[in-house]
Image (cartoon, rainbow, N blue to C red):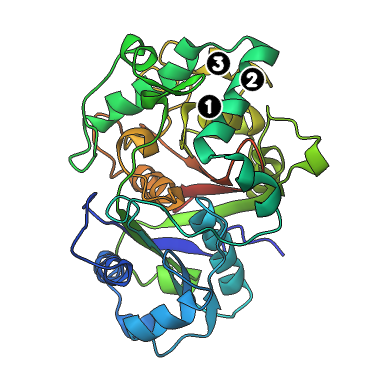
Amino acid sequence: MSIRGKAYVVGAFEHPDRVIPDRSVAQIHAENTAGVLKDAGLKLSDIDGLFIVGGAGGMLPVAMADYLGLTNLRILDGTAVGGSSPVYHIGHAAAAIAEGKCSIALVSLANRPRSEAGPRQAIPSPESSFEVVYGTSTLGMYALAAQRHMYEFGTTSEQLAWVKVAASEHAQYNPHALLPKPVSVEEVVNSPMLSDPLHRLDSCVVTDGGGAVIIASPEVARQIQRPKVKILGHGEAPKHTNNGKIDLTYTGARWSGPRAFEEAGCKPSDIDYASIYDSFTITVVETIEDLGFCEKGKGGQFVDDGGLRARGGKLPVNTDGGGLCNNHPGMGGMMKILEGVRQVRGEAHPEVQVKDLELALVHGTGGSLGTRMASATLILGVEDA
C-alpha cells in the first residue's frame, strides 16, 4: 500500500528557544503541542494518534499521552532511532492514516542536551562491551568516515567547509538561529581541529529545543484553512557494520532514498529543495551522493563553491541554517521536516525561499556514519501537486 497523497502536513511548529534551562522535556513537548495545534486550527481532543521522541524510558508515548491529556488516542509510536526518528514517524503516521487507524496524528520532538550537558548513562546494547571500552565517540566515528571519503575520492577540507558556509549564509536570515553569523571557508578550516579531519565548525551546534507537526487525512485537510503539504513518498532503512566489513563512504540513504522516490513517482533531478541531516559537514556530502543528486565520490565537488546556496546553488539545502548553525537538540530530524514544510508552504524567509517550488526532500540520519545508522527519506509536495 502506498501513502502517496493519503496524508497531509496540516500544522507545523518549531520551538523558538535554543537554551531552555527552566523547563523539562515534557514541558517542551507541551509547548510544541500548543504551538502546532494553534497553527493547524485544531483542538487537543482532535488528536487520535501520537508519534513522539525525546525523553527517558520505553514508556515515553504512554507517559506523554497522560501528561498532554490526550484521551482519544487510537495509536501510539515511540520509535527511537536517533536523529532520524521524527522522519520515521512521519512515514509511520501517514501509513496509519492510510490504513484508517487514526485521522489526525501529532508528531513531536523535544530534548535538552545543552542544558543537561555532562556524562550520560550508557544504554546497554549488544555492541557496547566491544566498542565503548575502546573510547569510541560520535565525533570520532564521523571523522573516520570523513577521512575515508577523502582517501577514496580526494574530497578536501575546503569542500566540506562549503557545507558550513552555505548553512551560515542561510542562518543569518533566521532570527532563532544559535549561530546567525556567516563564516568563510578559511574560518572553517582554521577553526580548532576536534577529530581529524573535522574541525569545530564542521560540527553541529548543541541546543535545547524541539518542534511538532500534525499529519491528517485528506478529509480533515480539506477542512483546514491553511496551506497544506502533501506527503508523496517515504523510505527508511538501517545500515549496520556488516560484521566489521563496513564501507564508510556511504549511508543508509542508499536504500531509503530510492524507496521514497519510487513511491513519490519522481527522481532526484525533480527536487527543488532538500533538508539534509547535517550533524557534521561530511554527513551532507555522503548523503547527497547516496540520494542520487550526484555520483558517488563527487559530493565534495557538488557542494564546492556554494553548491548548496538558496541563491545560485545546484540544490538549495537547509535554508534555516540547519544543525550546523540553527538548531540541533540531539535529534535534528524534526528541524529538517519543519524547514521542508516552510519551503513547500512558501513561508521560508524571502531571502532563502525557493521560487516556484513543487517538490521538497527531507532526509534524517540517526546513529553514526562510522558504525550503524537509521536513515529515512521523505518527499513532500505542494497541495495540488
Up/down of 63 relative to 356, above or below: below
Q: Is residue 2 visible?
A: yes
- Give the Cα separation between the discs numbered 2 and 3: 9 Å
Q: Position of residue 323 (x, y in %)?
A: 38, 39
Q: Residue at x 20, y 43 (%)?
A: 176
Q: Residue at x 70, y 41 (%)?
A: 258
Horizontally, residue 183 falls left or right of residue 123, namely: left
Circle on res. 149: 2
Q: Earlier in the sequence, mark 1 or mark 2?
A: 2
Q: Earlier in the sequence, mark 1 or mark 3?
A: 1
Residue bearing mark 3: 300
Q: Position of residue 373 (x, y in %)?
A: 63, 46
Q: Residue at x 76, y 35 (%)?
A: 246
Q: Position of residue 337 (x, y in %)?
A: 43, 50
Dot 1: what SS?
Answer: helix
| Residue 65 quadrant | bottom left
Q: Residue at x 54, y 74 (%)?
A: 58
* Nearer mark to the viewer, of 2 and 3: 2
Q: Is residue 48 visible?
A: no
Label 1 Cα neighbours within 10 Å, binned few <14 / some 14-19 / many ≥20: many
Q: Amino acid at mark 1?
A: Ile
Task: Say if mark 2 contacts mark 3, CB within 8 Å.
Answer: yes
Q: Residue furthest bottom?
A: 71
Task: Say if mark 1 contacts mark 2, CB within 8 Å.
Answer: yes
Horizontally, residue 46 falls left or right of residue 131, namely: left
Dot 3: what SS?
Answer: helix
Q: Earlier in the sequence, mark 2 or mark 3?
A: 2
Up/down of 39 relative to 367, above or below: below
- Give the Cα separation between the discs numbered 1 and 2: 9 Å
- Give the Cα separation between the discs numbered 1 and 3: 9 Å
Q: Amino acid at mark 2?
A: His
Residue bearing mark 1: 282
